[in-house]
Amino acid sequence: MGLFRRRRKSAEGSLDRAADSADVKHLEEFARSRRGVEAFVEPPTTMTATTVVFVAHDGEWTRRRVRDAAAAHGLARKLGIPAYDAQVVGYPQRMRDWNRKNGGRGA
């Protein structure tokens, strides 16, 4: 039955999959197809790897895995968008408004 069986950890030590090129491609396309995009870097947890949330001017957002915080900041720099540590600054009000209006699901 396996009710108390532990899940295997990935090579990175988390229970989640690692970032891949499809994640980066999605983030690049999101940033290039929307106005006013900002990046909010989320620290790794025991269940997930480092992630980054891209939030557009209207609050639409998307979250994807990244290799680490440095990679997230580097991607934002490459795309010419500002990047913040979500743990320090939080998320913008426009994202919460968008969630309320659209059922809380990002792109």
Image (spheres, grey):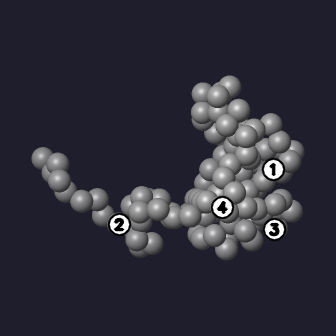
In the image, what residue occupies the spot 75% across and 38% down?
94
Whether tag 4 and tag 2 are in contact, CB under 8 A, the answer is: no
SS assignment at label 2: loop
Q: Position of residue 25 (x, y in %)?
A: 70, 57
For label 3, the residue is 77
Residue with the mark numbered 2: 9
Local packing at callout 1 (Cα closer than 10 Å; few below 14, some 14-19, many 20+) is: many
SS of the residue at dot 3?
Answer: helix
Residue 67 image point, x, y percent: 59, 69
Q: Nearer the viewer, mark 1 or mark 2?
A: 1
Q: Earlier in the sequence, mark 4 or mark 3?
A: 3
User: What is the three-letter code of the residue carrying label 1?
Assistant: Val
- Local crowd at mark 2 within 10 Å, few (<14), some, or many (≥20)? few
Q: Which numbered disc, 1 or 4, marks the residue closer to the eye? A: 4
Observer-side mark, 4 or 2, equals 4
Choose between 26 and 50: the one closer to the eye: 50
Q: Amino acid at mark 2?
A: Lys
Q: Residues within 10 Å of mark 4 (few under 14, many from 20)?
A: few
Cα gap from disc 4 to disc 2, whole angstroms: 28 Å
Q: Nearer the viewer, mark 4 or mark 3?
A: 4
Seen in the image, is 12 located left or right of residue 7? right
Residue 68 location, quadrant? bottom right
Disc 1 and disc 2: Cα gap in Å? 33 Å
Residue 8 visible here: yes
- Residue under circle 1? 37
Q: Disc 4 designates what residue?
A: 88
Height in image: 85 above or below 107?
A: below
Q: Amino acid at mark 3?
A: Arg
| Quarter of the image with the C terminus in it | top right
Q: Disc 1 vs disc 4: Cβ atoms closer than 8 Å?
A: no
Q: What amino acid does circle 4 point to?
A: Val
